[in-house]
Image (tube, coloured by chain):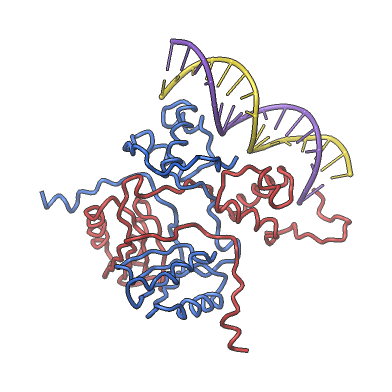
Chain colours: A blue, B red, C purple, D yellow
DNA sequence: GCTGAAATTTGTCTAGG
DNA sequence: CCTAGACAAATTTCAGC
């Protein structure tokens, strides 16, 4: 049932209608559990199953839902070593080699955090030795000026993008 | 279910059996696309649909698969501001209030990185103003000594735990 | 633990209101 | 967007190996 059908050459040129409350409810539910049936979701948000199905299909096409994935337990598959690695690059355009490391399965995230010369990597490997090997390889990339590794000892929260939005006026209050 | 079979292969059915190659293939496929049918997965790994189903059910029960979720596009739901926040705590046991922030939907990750006094938070909000509000609230938690925020400008890789394991001998090589 | 077949539940599309 | 129907396809169970 993989939805990799021939969509044609349609890019993401959707009308970008802002998501209504129903869409957000559906996204919120599916971000936590994507195994629920459309009928079940419909009962929660107050829609029929076909209506939910159509919305979910649209949410996938527009990219609001990037994919549906199984979240694995790192320890269960023998990956007991997680670290965040800060990388300082020599300058502009020098990060390409590092970003190419994203093809490796141990790299879970790569973010640019300052201009084009600083990166944050999230890397999960089996053990300390494997991490040392990765750092060795990382440091020998051209353009890598320095790295700083933060080893994770305990993970308290780890989840994807949440649909709910917190209205926070604590700062704005004193501005208005 | 008989404990001892008379075949030549001794299966470890008493405890958490280490994942075999079939399990890893299934996990690897589902970590990237959990919408595929069991029959489809079975054709890839060489099992029947019921066999895959049984393994997936076991992988869920044992926690190897924590959940299957929809990965949302932050920008699509109006969350265009992502940051990693390093928090230094005053000392042991002072991080509870910060960890309790994990209930907020803008907090995607909380990791302890050093002893019990340093944390990394991954926070995604609508805009800079919302981030300011979050930081304001964070900084006023008891035990928070200082915070350092790294604003993400571009995300190149963002995915969950990958089942594949890279054999890396690059460090051991030069030691031998 | 796996297979193949059967039974049940969902997914998916269509038509009409 | 709902209801309703119908068909395809998936999930889930089960006997038997």
Q: Determine the residue positioned at 55% across, 56% down.
A: A72
Residue B18 versus residue B79 in the image, above or below: below
Q: Furthest-left residue in view?
A: A176
Taking depth in this image into account, of C14 and B100 the one nearest to the observer is C14
Taking depth in this image into account, of B96 and A103 the one nearest to the observer is A103
Q: Determine the residue positioned at 33% across, 39% down.
A: A16
Q: Furthest-front residue in view?
A: A9
Q: Position of residue A116 (x, y in %)?
A: 33, 68
Does residue B55 appear in this view? Answer: yes
Q: Position of residue B164 (x, y in %)?
A: 60, 63
Q: Determine the residue positioned at 60% across, 66% down.
A: B165
Q: Tell me: B141 left or right of A155.
A: left
Q: Furthest-bottom residue in view?
A: B176
Residue C4 versus residue A152 in the image, above or below: above
Taking depth in this image into account, of B90 and D1 the one nearest to the observer is D1
Residue B25 versus residue A56 in the image, above or below: below
Q: Determine the residue positioned at 34% across, 57% down.
A: B123
Residue A156 versus residue A1 in the image, above or below: below
The image quadrant of residue A22 is top left
Q: Position of residue D1 (x, y in %)?
A: 41, 24
Q: Position of residue A115 (x, y in %)?
A: 29, 67
Does residue B115 appear in this view? Answer: no
Q: Tell me: B10 left or right of A103.
A: right
The image quadrant of residue B111 is bottom left
């Amino acid at each position: 049932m993989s939805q990799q059908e021939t969509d044609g050459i349609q890019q993401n040129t959707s009308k970008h209608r802002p998501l209504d409350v129903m869409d957000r409810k559906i996204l919120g539910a599916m971000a936590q559990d994507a195994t629920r049936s459309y009928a079940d979701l419909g009962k929660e948000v107050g829609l029929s199953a076909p209506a939910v199905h159509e919305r979910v299909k649209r949410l996938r096409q527009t990219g609001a839902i990037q994919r549906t994935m199984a979240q694995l337990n790192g320890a269960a598959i023998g990956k007991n070593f997680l670290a965040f690695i800060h990388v300082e690059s020599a300058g502009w355009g020098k990060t390409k080699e590092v970003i190419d490391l994203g093809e490796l399965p141990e790299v879970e995230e790569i973010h640019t955090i300052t201009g084009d010369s600083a990166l944050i990597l999230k890397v999960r490997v089996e053990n300390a030795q494997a991490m040392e090997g990765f750092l060795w390889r990382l440091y020998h990339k051209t353009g890598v000026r320095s790295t700083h590794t933060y080893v994770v000892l305990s993970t308290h929260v780890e989840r994807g993008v949440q649909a709910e939005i917190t209205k926070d006026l604590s700062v704005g209050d004193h501005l208005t």
